[in-house]
Structures are given as structure tokens and as C-alpha cells.
Image: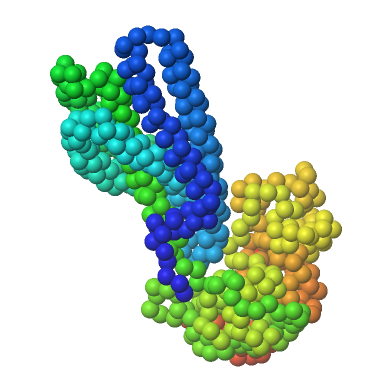
Amino acid sequence: MPPTPSPLRRLFGYFARHKSALTLGGLCVIASAGFSLLKPLIIGSAVNELATAVRRGVMVRYGLLLVGTAMCEGLFLLLQRRIIIGESRRIEYEMRNDFYGHLQSLPVAYYQEQRTGDLLSRATNDLASVRMLIGPAVMHSLSSLIVVIGAFVMMLRINREMALLSLISVPVIILMVRYFGQRIHVKFKAVQDYFGDISARVQENLAGVRVVRAFGRERAEGQLFAAMNREYVERNRTVIKLTAMFYPGLHAMIGLLFCLIFYLGSRAMILGTLSIGSFIAFQLYLGRMVWPLIALGWVTNLFQRGMASMVRLHEVWSIQPEVQADSGERVLVPVRGEIEIRHLTFTYAGSSRPTLRDIDLHVRPGETVGIVGRTGSGKSTLLALITRTFEPPPGTILIDRRPIESFPTSQLRQWIGAVPQETFLFSESIAENIRFGRRDASPQDVQESAGLAGLSGDVASFPQGLETLIGERGITLSGGQKQRTAIARALVRDPAILILDDSLSAVDTNTEEQILRALREIRKGRTALIVSHRVSSVKDADTIIVIDDGRIVERGTHDALLEQDGYYANLYRRQTLEEEIAEIA
């Protein structure tokens, strides 16, 4: 795996993609700065000529020169802004897409440790700060550098002593920029980090609004948010205070410099060693040199903010995906659905104890396997490894006698219709949530999948049928309706391998029986793996395995496992008794 580039190197990589346009923008910056430096020279020459005699021709000639120079400067200023700022927007667009694509490739374990609000903050605020670095900061830095060097050269030509004396301010300004710049960088990163905390808190409260209201925590959560908001304001004030000290300090330094130069220039004019036009030109060039140095403070602020944000983005970019999506060779023949697991032992990162131990399982094409076991025994982990949600050890899981790591993940997941244990629905219509399984699904396909999943009766009572909007995470649906929608989403793919991870836990017994009847027909000719804590969901499977503490401890048909009188038999008797008691009650 190639080494992860540094934040600065990654930024230069985006510059390299747009080097032609940025080079053209840089040339426009040079041209604009060049015409800007011509104006003091024109004004100084005009003053010298008009000091002897005021003539209309001289005034018209120099007036036209000034207007022409200003127009050329304005034209190139417009072009540099359109090109460089425009390219910064394009780079931001590319970075945003790359960042989102990288987020999509990261392992599930990463999201178990991160907060959604913080990631959203990085994808919005931090990217905007980086765009300000790429556009205005780079543009004004180049312009300021050219103007400062050009103005100093012209000042040397006018009066060497005063020009060299004006350099006294440069190291002071550089020290101030360095001192305040470092502190602004640290403080602004702290501000952005805390903004991520606030975003995460708001996101969690909005997502869990039902829990907040159920426990009457509205006022307490509001007070907590107000306290976090005050802390965010205080952290911003520290940045503002540094900036408020920075800019007045620069202005005071430059004001003293102008007073000194004015005094020396006045003496030189009295002695006759400096003309009034040259002195005016020198003052204008001094302004041209000094004010970019002040702008350098603003640019430094942008650089520090942008680099602080780039570091935050780099923290996410530096996380490598566990599964290499583009690896493997696509298979052209239809998949049969044979699954073979050989001596599979799997341990989660950061854990010292294996979740699965020495799992061996052979599932023939079209066969249905039921998986039961205690909570935390490793059932869901086994299914997640088959879909490569987590990366299994090489050569331990095979489909059609080929290791799953030899297939591109996109093709592998096209073959599989998976219903995860935790149902997630998008804030779209029911139809769009089902169509998420297969984007080209026709309305008839969606309708049939909804019927097979047992949704038809519920949909008939909805105001707009399948086109009914269900709110964020399907908040308007019951738990059972969510699970059936997720099942329909998997079925619409017409998958060769169907994986159900405890996907009937939220439906009642009658609805479960209806869905299972439909699934018996659907499962014909396709491989199915069904995890359930209900025996009724798996008793018709061709093979049932019992997983305990990461190992397969029982294996066989429903009747064979009852004869073994182990965990499965005890579970069956307990659930049968519970159903009988429920019927009596």
C-alpha cells in the first residue's frame, strides 16, 4: 500500500491538476502588479514636469497614461480573480468529491469510533477554509510578493538611503506575522475541532429527538447546547483578540515608518538632492510596498486557517480502507451461489480475543442455512465477512470455489441481497428506499418486492401508497414496517445469495409466517443465509448451525438438532412454551 502523502503534498497534488489555468492566473497577477507599479512612476514624472510649468498637453498626456495603466491593471485584476478564484472553486469541488468518496470507502469500524457531526464539519467548514487558502491566499501572496519586490527596486532607484532605511520595518513585520500566525493556527484548529463537537451534539439530538422528548430532556439539552455555544464563542474570541492585536500593531509600525521617511525626504528636498516628483513617487512606492505587507497578515491568517483545516481533512484521508474495492477480476459467467468457509478465524482490530474461531461451512447452490446462537456469539460478524463489510483472512471464504477477495467488491455485492440487523432507511419515499437496491427497478418490480416482503397491506393504508415519504431514518414507520421495507430492498435485486440478519425480529408472528411463506418461494434456486433468534424463522432451512462463543457447536436439520437435545432444542422448547402461554393469555 503506497504511503499516505502529507497534507501539503496532497494540496500540491490538486494544484498540479490545474497547473495550466493557475499558471495563466499567475501571469495575470504579474501583469496586474506590473501596471500597478507603473502608476507612481507616471505621477512622479508628471509632477516634475508640471512643477516647471502647467501645460494642457502635459496634463492630457499623463492623464491618458494613468487612465490606460489603470484600465490595464483593472483588466488583468479581473482576469486573475476569475481564473484563480474560479479554479479554487473547482479544486474545492474535486476535494469535496474525493473526501466523500473516501468516506464511502472507509471501514465500518471507523464510523463506530467517529461522530457524524464532526465529519460533516470537516466536509463543510474545513473544505471552505482550504478553498480560501487555494484562492485568495495564493493570489494575494503572489501579488504582494511581486509588488513588494518591484516597489523596493524602484525606491532604490529614487533614493538608496531612504529605501534601505525602509527595510527596518520588514524584520519586525515578519516577526509579528510569525508570532501571531502560529497562535492563530493553534487557536483556529481548536475552534474547528469544537465546532465539530457542536455539530455532533446537534446531529445526535435531532436523530434521537424521540428519546429526548420521552425522557423530558428538552430543557437540559438546550442548556447543554447553550453552554457549548458559549464555549464556541469564547474560543472564537481568542482568535479575534489575536487578530485585533495583530493588525493595529502592523499599522502602528507602518505609520512610524512613514513619519521617518517623510522627515528624511523633506530634508533631501530642502537640500536639493531630491525632486518633489521623485519624493511623491517614493512615497507612493513605499505605500505600494508596505500595504501588501499588511495584507500579508490577512493572507497569513488565511494560510493558518486553511492549513489547520487541511490537517483535519488529512486525518480522515490518512485512514486506509480495509477493503480494496478495485482489486480483483470481474467474473463474466453467472454466479451459482456456492459458499465455502474454510478454517475461518477472525479478530476485530483492537481486540485480543477472536470473535470467530475455526469456522467450517459448505453451502451448496440453492441451499438455505439457518444460523442461531446467543447474542454476541458472532452470527452477524460471519455475515459481514461474507459481504466483505469487514475483511476476512485471505482464502477463508470462497464463492463458487474462488476466494471472495479475488472479486471486485462491487460485483460481489451485486450478487448479494443483504438485510442487516439494524435497519436503515433514507428520508425518501418507500418506493425510493426499495429502488435503492436496484436503481433500474421498474414500478412493477418495486410493487412485487413490496408484496413479497409483506408490505402490501400496510402500503394500502398509506395516503400515497409506495410514494409516501417516510421521514428521516423512516421515522413514520413502525419497526416491523422498516424491516419489511429493507427486505423488499434486498429482494428487488433478484440476488443469487440472500442474507437475512435477524430481519424479522420486529414483526409479529402472523406477519412473520406470511413473509416466510413468500421467502420459501423466493429462496428456490438461490442460496440463503438466515440469522434469527426465532426458531420459527430457520426450522425449514436445509441446514441449521448453532454458533456459541465464535464456534459452530451444533449442525444439522431441525429434527436432527431436536434429537441432539442441545442449545437448539432448549431454545425450541422455550419458544414453543412462550407461544402457548401467549395464546392462552
Residue placed at 82% from the left, 61% from the top? 445
Residue 450 lies, in percent from the top left, at 77, 59
Residue placed at 79% from the left, 55% from the top? 457
Number of disc labels: 0
Q: Is residue 299 left or right of residue 263?
A: right
554 in relation to 317, above or below: below
Residue placed at 80% from the left, 50% from the top? 460
- Tell which of 513 and 469 is nearer to you: 469
- Tell which of 184 and 584 is nearer to you: 184
Residue 519 lies, in percent from the top left, at 76, 71
- Residue 30, by quadrant, is top left
| Figure quadrant of the C terminus | bottom right
Residue placed at 66% from the left, 74% from the top? 412
484 in relation to 331, above or below: above
- Tell which of 473 and 337 is nearer to you: 337
312 in relation to 363, above or below: above
Q: Is residue 233 left or right of residue 139?
A: left
Residue 490 makes an appearance in the image: yes
Residue 499 makes an appearance in the image: no
- Residue 317, by quadrant, is bottom left
Residue 313 lies, in percent from the top left, at 43, 54
535 in relation to 116, above or below: below
- Residue 302, by quadrant, is top left
Residue 17 lies, in percent from the top left, at 53, 56
- Tell which of 199 and 193 is nearer to you: 193
Colour convention: rainbow
